[in-house]
Amino acid sequence: MRSILLFLMLLPVLALARTTEPITSATWLAGCWAVDGKEAGTGEQWMAPAGGSMLGAGRTVKDGKTVGFEFMQIRSTEEGKLEFVAMPSGQNETTFSLVSSTEGSLVFENLGHDFPQRIMYRSISTDQIIGRAEGSVSGSLRGIDFPMNRIPCEATLSPTD
């Protein structure tokens, strides 16, 4: 009887441990995002966390044509850490390890990569985020910001496609 009571007392703790899986810290990123000031169709789309990962895709449109794309993944490692995996425009994948995480902010780093060495996402509000790629180029710190607004995922569909 004592072991049953102990088990019942521990159930809420066990449930909390399961819901605080590392990938849940990136849930706010799920959805469709349009990059400010860029042509329609330029942005990112992130699937909600499932199975220890989030899958994402990015696209850059210029003059009505796709000029760049990227497949992305944020995943939990066996050690319980998060990684960001980028596969831009058919290049080999690059893995960045999580170095900082706060509520609404993720910073991934791979100092051995040429550029970028850091990938960052920061939530401004439920409908605005900033993605940032930064690193050292010829000894100087460079960065590219991608301010994005949440859009309905259906808005990424074009009637002409």
Image: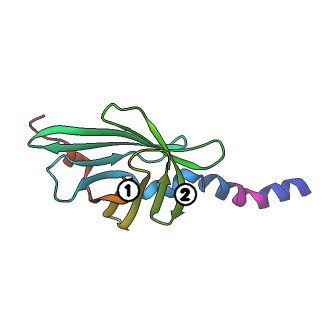
Answer yes or no: do the residues labelled 2 and 1 have beta carbons within 8 Å?
no
**Span of residues in magenta:** 9-14
Residue at the (18%, 42%) spot, across then down = 157
Amino acid type at circle 1 is: Glu
Sequence order check: which comes first, mark 2 or mark 1?
2
Which quadrant, please, contains the C terminus? top left
- Majority SS type along the magenta span: helix
Q: Position of residue 97 (x, y in %)?
A: 53, 49
| 55 to the left or right of 62 | right
In the image, residue 20 sits, relative to residue 41, either above or below, namely below
Circle 2 or circle 1, nearest the eye: 1
In the rendered image, is residue 131 in sight? no
Q: Residue 62, image x and y in percent? A: 13, 44
Q: Pointer 1: what residue?
A: 134
Label 2 Cα crowd, 10 Å radius (few <14 / some 14-19 / many 20+): some
Residue 132 image position (x, y, % from top left): 35, 58
Residue lying farthest right? 2
* Residue corresponding to mark 2: 99
Q: Is residue 122 magenta?
A: no
Local secondary structure at mark 1: strand
